[in-house]
């Protein structure tokens, strides 16, 4: 029951924090895109860009802090961070839909992140990644709580690492659209699909290792 209460509080934080993030975007779009957000991107004031980069870094720090406070082991903390991040990102788009009626579809383009370069892509990409984060986070939390230490094999780590690189390339490869304010090239959905498949494969390997292993809690 204690684990359930902690999970509920983490979920409530993520949902509320998503609304705070969405309101910032509402104000920014009112300032730079009063007619509605669309590409090509518009040049923002340097101080606004600096503040946005700092805000995104603070967002990651806050989500990581929630994970650290909620978990009692290293992997529980990682699991709660993944859960909070996934729920936060999903509700961020839900709040934007309720407030701005945007995105019209999951295939609308968005600025996803700014560190270290601007990330762009269709909304469906972060949505699918967030779903996987939520599933993986809940699974890790449950595994740590009920079955002992979660210890994925090295191959699972390698698959997750390659998946992350492939997906990041799909978000940051079109520098003409992000740094030169041009219309974006068609999104490389095949890179997203490959990355998601590698993520799922890594999760399956870790799950099988955990079911067959006999590690105890450290």
Image: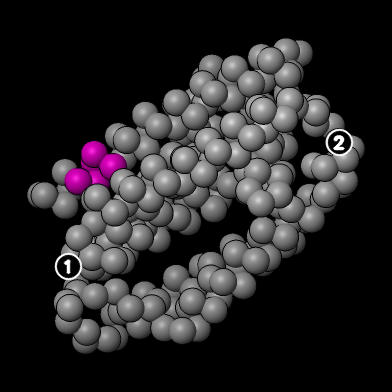
As for residue 8 lying within the magenta part, the answer is yes
Residue numbers of the magenta segment: 6-10
Q: Which residue appears farthest toward the front when viewing the image?
A: 47
The Cα–Cα distance between marks 1 and 2, rounded to whole angstroms, is 50 Å
Between disc 1 and disc 2, the foreground one is: 2
Label 2: which secondary element: loop
From the viewer's perspective, tell me whether residue 16 is left or right of residue 163: left
Q: Which residue appears farthest toward the left when viewing the image?
A: 1
Q: Position of residue 174 (x, y in %)?
A: 82, 50
The one of 110 and 24 positioned closer to us in this rendering: 24
Q: Quadrant of the C terminus?
A: bottom left
As for residue 183 lying within the magenta part, the answer is no
Can residue 100 be seen at all in this image of the molecule?
no
The numbered mark at residue 77 is none
The one of 137 and 119 positioned closer to us in this rendering: 119
Compared to residue 180, the image places residue 215 above or below, namely below
Q: Earlier in the sequence, mark 1 or mark 2?
A: 1
The numbered mark at residue 181 is 2
Location of mark 1 (residue): 146
Q: For the point 80% across and 27% down, which residue is it?
A: 42
Q: Residues within 10 Å of mark 1 (few under 14, many from 20)?
A: few
Label 1: which secondary element: helix
Q: Position of residue 3 (x, y in %)?
A: 16, 52
The one of 126 and 120 positioned closer to us in this rendering: 120
Compared to residue 160, the image places residue 20 above or below, namely above
Q: For the point 40% across and 54% down, which residue is it?
A: 82
Compared to residue 190, the image places residue 105 above or below, namely above
Marks 1/2 in contact by CB < 8 Å: the verdict is no
Compared to residue 5, the image places residue 20 above or below, namely above
């Amino acid at each position: 029951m204690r684990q359930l209460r902690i999970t509920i509080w983490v979920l409530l934080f993520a949902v509320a924090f998503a609304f705070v993030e969405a309101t910032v975007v509402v104000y920014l779009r009112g300032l730079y895109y009063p007619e509605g957000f669309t590409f090509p991107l518009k040049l923002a004031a340097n101080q606004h860009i600096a503040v946005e980069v700092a805000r995104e870094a603070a967002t990651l720090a806050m989500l990581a802090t929630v994970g650290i406070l909620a978990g009692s082991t290293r992997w529980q903390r990682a699991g709660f961070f993944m859960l909070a991040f996934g729920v936060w990102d999903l509700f961020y788009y839900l709040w934007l839909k309720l407030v701005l009626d945007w995105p019209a579809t999951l295939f609308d383009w968005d600025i996803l992140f700014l560190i270290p370069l601007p990330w762009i892509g269709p909304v469906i990409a972060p949505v699918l990644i967030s779903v996987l984060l939520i599933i993986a986070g809940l699974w890790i939390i449950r595994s740590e709580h009920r079955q002992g230490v979660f210890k994925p094999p090295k191959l699972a780590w390698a698959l997750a690492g390659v998946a992350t690189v492939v997906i990041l390339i799909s978000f940051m490869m079109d520098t003409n659209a992000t740094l030169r304010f041009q219309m974006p090239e068609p999104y490389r959905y095949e890179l997203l699909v490959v990355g998601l498949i590698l993520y799922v494969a890594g999760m399956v390997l870790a799950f099988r290792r955990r079911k067959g292993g006999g590690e105890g809690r450290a």
